[in-house]
Image (tube, rainbow, N blue to C red):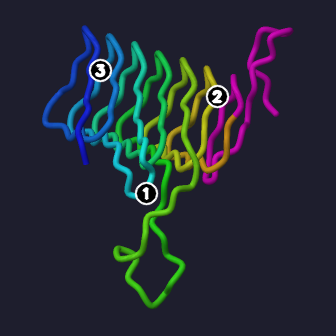
């Protein structure tokens, strides 16, 4: 795997940290302590990317692992211990230890601008719209639309912003 790491101006990466692969970190972004940021074509993809936009804050102990494409748009905030991945370990054959089964590509991931992911959130092969709030401990396995609040396992939308009323509405 070839490292092609680019870090924008005024960005801060707090060590220790692990960054590998084709990773682009925008300007004025902070990647906090003991995070693991990697883009690695373990599923056979040739063009693997992991992009973190401008003005983002990635919390402590985050793991963001791309085997195809993860894009975190501008001004996204993640709390501590957030996991974001576009792949899963295979487990189809019960006769083979999971560690020896192939990694499966399950989708691409996009985290929309201005969104916030609470502590211990897992995003697995799904996208989150812009200006969303994902509650603590949620597991996102399906796309979440723009201007939504989602919680739970699996994450479900519980509020959406109503632009006519100019308030968050429970659904």
Residues rendered magenta in the picture: 145-171
Q: Nearer the viewer, residue 57 or 127?
A: 127
SS state under label 3: strand
Determine if the magenta segment contains residue 114.
no
Name the residue at the bottom extreme.
Answer: 95
The quarter of the displayed image where residue 36 is located: top left
Task: Report the residue marked by disc 3.
Answer: 30
Question: What residue appears at the point 35 percent right and 43 percent down from the top-left corner?
Answer: 39
Task: Report the residue marked by disc 1.
Answer: 44
SS state under label 2: loop
**Of tags 3 and 1, which is closer to the observer?**
1
Instruction: Determine whether label 2 and label 3 are within 8 Å by CB.
Output: no
Instruction: Determine whether label 3 and label 1 are within 8 Å by CB.
Output: no
Q: Nearer the viewer, residue 67 or 61?
A: 67
Name the residue at the left extreme.
Answer: 16
The quarter of the displayed image where residue 113 is located: top right
Residue 104 position, x and y percent, is 50, 62
Q: Is residue 144 left or right of residue 134?
A: right
Real-space Cα separation, disc 3 to disc 1, in angstroms:
30 Å
- Label of residue 129 in the image: 2
**Of tags 2 and 1, which is closer to the observer?**
1
Residue 121 position, x and y percent, is 48, 43
Question: What residue appears at the point 38 percent right and 82 percent down from the top-left corner?
Answer: 97
Q: Of label 2 and label 1, which has the lower sequence position?
A: 1
Q: Is residue 158 left or right of residue 40?
A: right
Q: Is residue 37 shown above or below 24?
A: below
Q: Badge 2 local density, few (<14 within 10 Å), some, or many (20+)?
A: some
Q: Badge 3 local density, few (<14 within 10 Å), some, or many (20+)?
A: many
Question: What residue appears at the point 40 percent right and 14 percent down from the top-left corner?
Answer: 54
């Amino acid at each position: 795997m070839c490292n092609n790491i680019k870090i924008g101006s005024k960005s801060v990466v707090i060590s220790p940290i692990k960054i590998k692969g084709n990773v682009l970190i925008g300007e004025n972004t902070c990647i906090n302590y003991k995070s693991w940021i990697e883009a690695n074509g373990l599923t056979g993809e040739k063009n693997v990317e992991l992009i973190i936009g401008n003005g983002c804050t990635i919390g402590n102990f985050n793991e963001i692992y791309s085997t195809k494409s993860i894009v975190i748009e501008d001004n996204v905030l993640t709390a501590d211990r957030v996991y974001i991945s576009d792949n899963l370990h295979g487990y189809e054959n019960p006769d083979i230890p999971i560690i020896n089964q192939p990694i499966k590509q399950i989708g691409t991931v996009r985290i929309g601008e201005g969104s916030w992911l609470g502590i211990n959130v897992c995003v697995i092969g799904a996208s989150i719209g812009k200006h969303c709030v994902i509650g603590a401990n949620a597991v996102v396995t399906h796309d979440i639309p723009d201007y939504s609040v989602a919680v739970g396992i699996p994450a479900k939308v519980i509020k959406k912003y109503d632009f006519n009323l100019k308030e968050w509405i429970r659904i």
